[in-house]
Amino acid sequence: MPPLPGPVAAAFQALLAGPKRERTQAQLLQASVQVFQSVGVSAATVQQVAQAAGVTAGTFYNHFATKDELLARLAELIGASLCRAIRDSAQGIEDGAWRMAIGQRRYVGMGVESPAWALLLIDVVAAAPQLGEALAQDALADLRLGVRQKRFRVPSEDAALDVITGVCLAATRRVAEGRAPARHDVATAAVVLRALGMPPDEAAELARRPLPPLPA
Amino acid sequence: MPPLPGPVAAAFQALLAGPKRERTQAQLLQASVQVFQSVGVSAATVQQVAQAAGVTAGTFYNHFATKDELLARLAELIGASLCRAIRDSAQGIEDGAWRMAIGQRRYVGMGVESPAWALLLIDVVAAAPQLGEALAQDALADLRLGVRQKRFRVPSEDAALDVITGVCLAATRRVAEGRAPARHDVATAAVVLRALGMPPDEAAELARRPLPPLPA
Amino acid sequence: MPPLPGPVAAAFQALLAGPKRERTQAQLLQASVQVFQSVGVSAATVQQVAQAAGVTAGTFYNHFATKDELLARLAELIGASLCRAIRDSAQGIEDGAWRMAIGQRRYVGMGVESPAWALLLIDVVAAAPQLGEALAQDALADLRLGVRQKRFRVPSEDAALDVITGVCLAATRRVAEGRAPARHDVATAAVVLRALGMPPDEAAELARRPLPPLPA
Amino acid sequence: MPPLPGPVAAAFQALLAGPKRERTQAQLLQASVQVFQSVGVSAATVQQVAQAAGVTAGTFYNHFATKDELLARLAELIGASLCRAIRDSAQGIEDGAWRMAIGQRRYVGMGVESPAWALLLIDVVAAAPQLGEALAQDALADLRLGVRQKRFRVPSEDAALDVITGVCLAATRRVAEGRAPARHDVATAAVVLRALGMPPDEAAELARRPLPPLPA
DNA sequence: GATGAATGAGGGTTCATTCAT
DNA sequence: CATGAATGAACCCTCATTCAT
């Protein structure tokens, strides 16, 4: 099973270092990732998670009132660490269009580097829509930035968001499932930028520009 | 059952009214639509479906070997009727771009006219991916047509498909959930056409052109 | 374990003779009596009842939506058969005071003849107050009759009811638990009649009068 | 905590304020009263009691070996304080009949002044029968006194006790549940005295006589 | 083909109780 | 003494599925 993407893994490590109570909670969260990946979020059972964490189901309920609460907590964790990571990775970049391209490609790239993890993310988003909302916030900010900078021109913000999130989801899944050609991230970034009103050439150029390195 | 968009409903009914022998099967399928709409695909139980169809759970298993088989059969049915309805609605139209716009707007429009039905569709697609594949076929044909006609220019067919399906899904859901502004179908069609490489003006004009009437 | 009191047993027999569905239900009800008697109403589990009835817990839930529903159904059954039996046993008797004495003694007598059953009744009444209400109705009728006939004279109907039900409960339990002297039914009937305003001699005479035979 | 009738509360407090070492135990006992009142004795959990006492469940078990032990200890405490309070309130009164009336009315009066407390008492008695026994001792003493004084004349001591305890329980519950008319204590005291063989007029007069003031 | 009663393998959740710190 | 994390045995209930009639 592919490892967690770096930043999220780091967030887990942080929790594991805490006092015992939080350590167990972190174990349960990590275990839930494993279980969710192997059987899916909706089919996963509390017992499976508990067992994978090396505790009993009773213990699970000492930490989460409900299966849904675990999911919500996991969604939060993922949302926070992922948003931060992607935001950090575009730190200092002022061009909204370039930021948008980076975001798109980072998500799709995740499908290449950690397919299982990308599928998990998709699964969690489906089960905990608030995570989707959270992730969309950053995209929205970049979108508005690009619009203010006249890099984008869109008929409606909602339509633009639908492109951004819809394509991101479809492309990430395709990549994670191995159904995508090479450099699918570049291709999708290009079409998204065009959808947002950029001229094709400029969109293509921006989409294929090398990604800035991830901060440590 | 919230009304289907007329022609889709007709196609669905037509398929249901197959050989006399399968009367009960048809009832079960129709019942499953009701139940899936009211509690969701994954929460629906065989007993609920059977009851809604006016038969017992035992009877259900005379017609479907498994709950999943019902779902698969329903997915097939929906796929066939929906594809046919949408294809019919673009009958005689030769312009790939215009066909694409029509398709997009028909789906999104379904979210306006029959939100429950649209949500069901989304739910079924999630549970039975083959339905998504089937629906994408028509879009793919239009895409290729448009490309051949030089109306579209895309970096990769896969990326284009991701735009088409991803936006369609996101927009339809948004509309069905009442989170979209008026004429969201037009706005999304426009961005999709731009994504496929059309000049913004042309895309906008095509997207807002009046839809051809649905055939009886 | 002492048998059910005749009339209630008869009610069960009637149910057992019905179609299969009702037969299983009757089995479950009878099984619940056994289980309730041996571990108490509140400690009894659905599984115990199901097992005692020779079915699985799943089957239990095909017949009763809930443990409480089983209890309610049992309370109903007991209430109906017991009230009817006691009313029948005083059929044709016009004297409210004599009817009252008969009722008291029948209940307390149940504690002698079927202690386990009497304790069950007490337990069920505690858990399903509606049964207590039902049983009290007959007593209330007799009370009012006696008052109209000037056999009783009470400061308030509520106080009278408290005597009747309170003593009945305490005495039946005492008898069923083997803590009562012989003819405790007679003694308690006498004090109740006195409490309702009858002269001690008359009360004592009425209380010790031989009970009319039970109808077949 | 709904107020106890003053002196009873005082006695209870006094017992709670025992040797310094058992401070926590006292807190747990007091907490159990709160919890038992709000959710009932049988539904209360150790964790709830502990939490209400401001300690952890672990601490609970440093003081009580078992949940039942807490109940037993509480029953003892209530028994002692209640008996003492009621005995004190009849201090110096020599007439057994008058003492009996006072006792009855004090209990029923508790249902008026502190319904929650009365219901708790009833609940605890049901769960810990020894408490019922204890409370009955005082009544028994008064009964015997009255008999010796020829104020009472009863067919059997057991029957008399059943009247006293049975009516007391039923009336107190009725009052606490708000189902009783005004001065229900007087009415029930009157019927009890009649049941014990007093002439109606005398019983009524005694029952309605003003209660002696509670000692501070 | 339809019935409907029965099944049984879980699933989520609770809670009295233990024990190392 | 107090803590608080952990336990594990149950419990209630659900539901896809089977099968004799």
Image (cartoon, coloured by chain):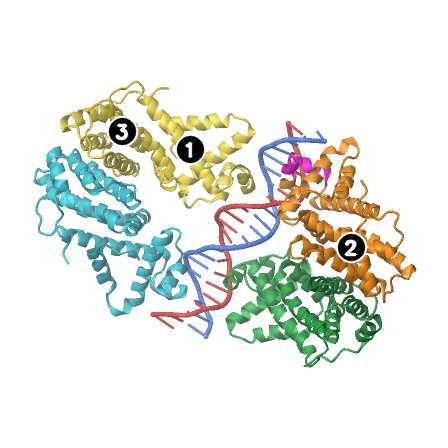
Chain colours: A yellow, B cyan, C green, D orange, E red, F blue
Chain letter for mark 2, please. D
Q: Where residue D157 appears, x then y in whole percent?
A: 85, 62
C-alpha separation, residue under disc 2 versus residue under disc 1: 61 Å
Q: Reply above or below: C189 against B94.
A: below
The verdict on residue D172 being magenta is no
Residue flagged by tag 2: what amino acid is it?
Answer: Gln
**What is the chief secondary structure element of the magenta stretch?**
helix
Q: Is residue A23 left or right of residue A191?
A: right
Chain letter for mark 1, please. A
Residue lying at 32% horizontally and 66% vertically, measured from the top left: B24
Q: Reply above or below: C88 against A17.
A: below
Quadrant of res C105 = bottom right
Mark 3, residue position: A105
Mark 1, residue position: A76
Q: Nearer the viewer, residue C110 or B192?
A: C110
Mark 2, residue position: D104
Secondary structure of residue under mark 1:
helix
Question: Magenta segment, which residues?
Answer: D50-64
